Amino acid sequence: MAEPNSSATIRALADLAELSATQLEEGRSVDDVIEILRKAAKSVRSALDPKTEAPEEDFTPVDLKEELEKVEDLSA
């Protein structure tokens, strides 16, 4: 795995880790969290190298900030 080369990448990874932890703490199933993590990974990979994305794959990019806000709204 390549090393993160920007603070934005590191922040995004931290946000994703926090989102996952929050979801698990609030009772979201492990399978749901795994699905979100896989979608996020595919989105990042396709953004970095769109040529590697298989055309038959169907996924929706995940806006981590939006997802985190949804989780925070639920916990309020």
Image (tube, helix red, strand yellow):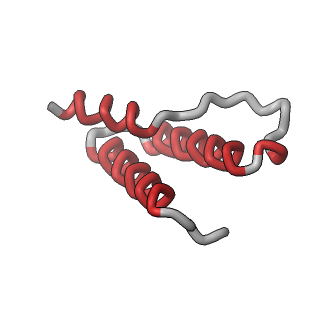
In the image, what residue occupies the spot 34% across and 46% down? 24
User: Which of the 4 image quadrants contains residue 7?
Assistant: bottom left
In the image, what residue occupies the spot 53% across and 46% down? 37
Question: Disc count in the image?
Answer: 0
In the image, what residue occupies the spot 63% across and 41% down? 43
Along the line of sight, the residue nearer the viewer: 24 or 73: 73
x then y, percent, for residue 69 = 30, 33
Q: Relative to 36, is 17 above or below?
A: below
| Residue that extends furthest to the left in the rendered view of this protein | 76
Q: Is residue 30 left or right of residue 43?
A: left
x then y, percent, for residue 46 = 71, 43
User: Which of the 4 image quadrants contains residue 2?
Assistant: bottom right
| Quarter of the rendering occupied by the N terminus | bottom right
x then y, percent, for residue 3 = 60, 71
Q: Is residue 5 left or right of residue 74?
A: right
x then y, percent, for residue 73 = 23, 29
| Quarter of the rendering occupied by the C terminus | top left
Q: Relative to 24, is 6 above or below?
A: below
Q: Relative to 50, is 59 above or below?
A: above
Q: Is residue 28 left or right of residue 4?
A: left
In the image, what residue occupies the spot 45% across and 44% down? 30
